[in-house]
Image (tube, rainbow, N blue to C red):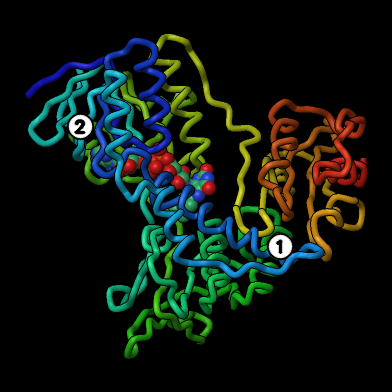
Amino acid sequence: MDAQYDAVVIGMGPGGEVAATQLVQNGKRVAVVERELIGGECGYWACIPSKTLLRPLEAAAGAAGVAGLDAPAPDWAAMRDYRDTMIRHLDDSKQVEGYRSQGVHVYKGTARFVGREPWEVAVDEHRLTADHVIVATGSAAALPPVDGLEEIEVWTNRQATTVEEIPGRAVVVGGSAVGVEMGQFLARMGCSVTLVQRGPALMDREEPRVGELAAEHLRGDGVDVRTGTSPRRARRSGRDSVLELDDGTEAVGDVVLMATGRRPRLEDLDLEQVGIGPGAKGLEVDERCRVAPGLWAVGDVTGTALFTHVAKYQGGIVAANILGRERTADYTGVPRVVFSDPEIAAVGLTAEQARAQGYDPVSAEVDLPRGLARPWTYATSPAGRMGVVADRTRRTLLGAWAVAPLAGEWIHTAALAIREGIGIDRLRDGVFQFPTYSEGYLLAVNELEL
Ligand SMILES: Cc1cc2nc3c(=O)[nH]c(=O)nc-3n(C[C@H](O)[C@H](O)[C@H](O)COP(=O)(O)OP(=O)(O)OC[C@H]3O[C@@H](n4cnc5c(N)ncnc54)[C@H](O)[C@@H]3O)c2cc1C
């Protein structure tokens, strides 16, 4: 069966959803193809369940940390039920119905390319031709090449976020966002967690201080954080899943969560059929998110910055260009948040990245409870740190980070300053609400030796 569209969207995670919605709302004839669930990885196995599971534990720790409240005990059955509500019991029928009611043709199946000029996509027995095709197929967990993995109980984000029974012991491999969030979640649920990180620090794309503080907080939750080592071999020993590490030690769990990065989901698209070869990190796009004339890509599959907000932003960029409103992407000042407790937030460049890009960086770090009132009204034994990186020559903010309560909210002040090139002198003249964590910016920018 053949059908002709203005645009076909392959993959209905956040990136695909934004593009499809904006196109159909602007009168385009749109088809979408989704082989699993509309909402994508984010909605069912990533952002939404992880944040939903972490929040009650953060609230309980918050209650334990203020005067006059006792720590409420987590009720796993209730937490799990709410998680299941939030992931719609892995059912997207309302989403399918919602798109159909807007006039979008929804195909449930795996899309692959079968033709070019015009673009032609096959989904089972259907043949869809379109002026524009948007690839928004996301990413999947990438497993490291470790011998014996097939012998042990391996989890990816999918099993971790849909967990039914909390394991007694878990090994988490990987110390970036997914490893830190899920490691803390499991530990706070009473699981004995060993976290193995190959590099010398956790969160190794951030300022080294961020990794140190993340490790400190995880250790405070009882996580055995082991840095500078990685799995060499896996084996089963009775019911144990054992990882032999390259420092000669072992890590043992009932399960091993691999939080070791992502790979673009390209394998079923048959892109080579239409003469498109992926780059090292995914589908290479230009500043308008275009792969080739009439072929576009958004989200994790582009390997740009693996966040939902970036996928959604790119979805908007592509829709605008297809609608004839030329728009280019600007990734300056995109926030990066880990929703652990306390939150870890960062934006812009680290000092090292700034130096590598030819800036003359100057940094400052502040202890928030030392300088602010808000941490003390927030908790009886507060902790929280933040840092800023500025360019000495231009006197502008280049980067900022915070490991502190609600940092994912107030990092946006720095995000905006970096994106808009707001000068340090202007920030020093800022008037921030008292008593808030945002006042930390005044402390930090005043600490800069500029
Ligand atoms: C545990 C975890 C927590 C995370 N938390 C956050 C967070 O808090 N905030 C944040 O910003 N980011 C977070 N992320 C990252 C975020 O999930 C991704 O950046 C986001 O999902 C990318 O969206 P996307 O639209 O590119 O693709 P996806 O959400 O991956 O969706 C792609 C869709 O394409 C479909 N598809 C694939 N191939 C085909 C095909 N051939 N035919 C048809 N359909 C196909 C898939 O079934 C899928 O539904 C997290 C990731 C993980 C793993």
Report which residue position mark 1 lands on.
63
391 relative to 192 in the view: left or right: right
Whole-percent x and y of residue 240? 37, 85
Q: Classify mark 1: helix, strand or loop.
A: helix
For image coordinates 26% across by 24% down, the residue present is 100
Mark 1 and mark 2: span between their CA atoms? 47 Å
Nearest the eye: 134 or 118: 134
Q: Amino acid at mark 1?
A: Ala
Q: Residues within 10 Å of mark 2 (few under 14, many from 20)?
A: some
For image coordinates 25% across by 46% down, the residue present is 267
Nearest the eye: 237 or 56: 56
Q: How many marks?
A: 2
Q: Residues within 10 Å of mark 1 (few under 14, many from 20)?
A: some
Report which residue position mark 2 lands on.
107
Task: Report the quarter where the C terminus lies.
Answer: top right
Q: Is residue 162 visible?
A: yes
434 relative to 354 in the view: left or right: right
Whole-percent x and y of residue 282? 38, 42
For image coordinates 17% across by 24% down, the residue present is 128
| Occupied quadrant, residue 118 | top left
- CB of mark 1 within 8 Å of CB of mark 2? no
Nearest the eye: 406 or 444: 406
Q: Whereabouts is ligand 1, in terms of quadrant? A: top left
For image coordinates 39% across by 11% down, the residue present is 26
Q: Is mark 2 within 8 Å of ligand 1?
A: no
Query: Closer to the camera: disc 1 or disc 2?
Result: 1
Q: Amino acid at mark 2?
A: Tyr
